[in-house]
Image: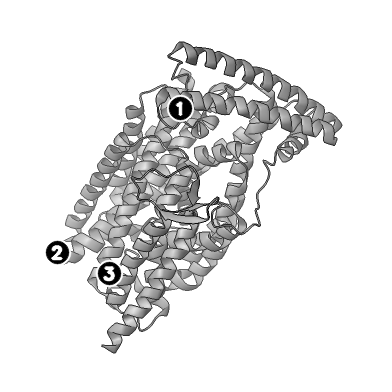
Amino acid sequence: MSWIDWLVLIAFLAYTIWDGTRRGKDSDTIEGYLLANRSMPWWAAGLSVMATQASAITFIGTTGIAYVEDMRFVQTYLAIPFAMIFICMFLVPFFNKMQNFTAYEVLEERFGLKTRLTTSGLFLISRGLALGVVIAAPSYVLSLLLGLPLNITILIIGIIATLYTTVGGIAGVINTDVKQMIVMMFGLVFCFGLIWMYLPEEVGFDGALYLAGSLDKLTALDLNFDLTEKYNVWSGVIAAFFLMVSYFGTDQTQVQRYLTTDSVKNARKSLLLTAYAKVPMQFFILLLGVMLYVFFIFNSAPASFRASEPVAQTEQQVQSEQQILQQYETAHQARKEAALEAVQSRNESTQQLFVETDAEMNEARDAELALQAEIRQADVNDTNYIFPYFILNYVPVGVIGLIVAGIFAAALSSIDSELNALTTVSIVDWYQRLIGDVHDEAYYVKSSRGVTFFWGALATGSALLMGETRSIIELVNQIGSYFYGSILGVFILLLWVKRATGTGALVGLLSGMLSVFIFDRLFYNATSGDYSFFLPWSTVPESYTKAIEFLWLNPVGTTVVVCVGVIISFIHNKE
């Protein structure tokens, strides 16, 4: 990056620290620090909800998925409007009536302290694990963009987020999230417009859609019901409904946002903002990834979007590298010519030729990635490097700094929210509950700041130790799917099963977690028709695939918790 870009980035980061910490003076009570005295406007809370989920993972991972695959990932978000309506009808009034600090306080009155601590403990584990990923994932590509060592970018993100969250509390978090959301959206819209502008005049936006459609890149809906497919309409509407209700309705990172509003009406409005905007936003980001693919048909692109390392080491690898790159360049040029001819004539023969040349180019690209994997002796994937490559090589000077700031903003907006939520659960559900309310407000505010610093340091440390992930956005959803369904089941028992007992809820929760683990490790051999269970450290044969994909773990966990909880409660009540 040029010195102008560095100046823009440094100015943004400095403003973020100032903007987040200046609200610290309003956080002199525990309610002020953790809930902003329930005085935040609905639109700010709503934008904070969106910014928390629209992290750097959304910037980098979603565009990469659309580039490498298609737009079917949008189906994961189809359930959001239905989930938001459900939460607004049932959970928001309940939480508002209880006037609680966390989503898990309400469990103790019906189910006892053990259930409350177990559920909140699962939240701490799940979000603690995810937070390391949220810091580490964008750091890899930011290190490429900035030309800095990986450890330095991790420390920059971790330290800045921890600093202003520790000082400013939830008011500082929401205040910075609003600005960060604006910067994020500017970066996405600018890149989309830039791609459109760089397309050849004879292609244009209409031609780009024609080419993308010819390659099935615009496929957004899959109506086939298949538990082994990650993304289809059924997993997006049914399985993801459980994920989204649990995430937005029982996860403290989201619940805490609408607990900062002053009424049920405003809490609902903050959630409905996400209901209206989230699916179109995700569709736009995926379309940006597809447009990137069309852009690189007419502009130079490397066989691998990763950095030049690793280089070939043996003579045979050198020869293979040269042969692959020659094949790639030839296929890339042939694809460009075929694309121009296909757009101009738009008949079946030219379209088929374009599809064939695209397949040849991707065959060479896959061979290059396989060679890199052989040299590294590790799985290699460049999905998370595609968008950063475009930023570095095609975005004008000055704007690069602003877009990189947008990626930083996306990372920070997720980290600060999780830090604040982890602190709230740690203090309210554990520390304050177990030792009793024996200290004054100043003590608990000071303790909250100390706990925020602890979680920030722990997450930053774990990010430093974490390996690079294959698809960062999928990994976060997979981590969440291990926990969300089971936690949702406990809340269903709380709200709609009047005879449910604490023993039933606790045994159901543990049973749900066990069932999720079992189904996640269940594999299917399509040739023999056999099902096999593999432990996490076992080697899974290539002939086996997942029996059910991760989104379906959410309804599995919920169903098992409710069923086991009802049965155990019936037995307990009978005794």
Residue 114 is situated, as x and y percent measured from the top left of the image, at: 23, 69
Q: Residue at x 45, y 43 (%)?
A: 541
Figure colour scheme: one colour
Extreme residue in the front direction: 528
Q: Nearer the viewer, mark 1 or mark 2?
A: 1
Secondary element at tag 1: helix
> Marks 2 and 1: in contact by CB < 8 Å?
no
User: Which image quadrant is residue 486 in?
Assistant: bottom left
In this picture, residue 195 sits left or right of residue 452: right
Residue 565 higher or lower than 3, as above or below: below
The residue beneath circle 1 is: 373
The residue beneath circle 3 is: 115
The residue beneath circle 2 is: 435
Q: Residues within 10 Å of mark 1 (few under 14, many from 20)?
A: some
Residue 39 higher or lower than 62, as above or below: below
The answer to whether residue 19 of the structure is visible from this angle is: no
Residue 29 is situated, as x and y percent measured from the top left of the image, at: 25, 58
User: Which image quadrant is residue 94 in?
Assistant: bottom left
What's the amino acid at mark 1? Ala
Quarter of the picture holding the C terminus:
bottom left
What's the amino acid at mark 2? Ile
The answer to whether residue 240 of the structure is visible from this angle is: yes
What's the amino acid at mark 3? Thr
Q: In terms of sequence position, does the residue under pointer 2 or pointer 3 come before the other? A: 3
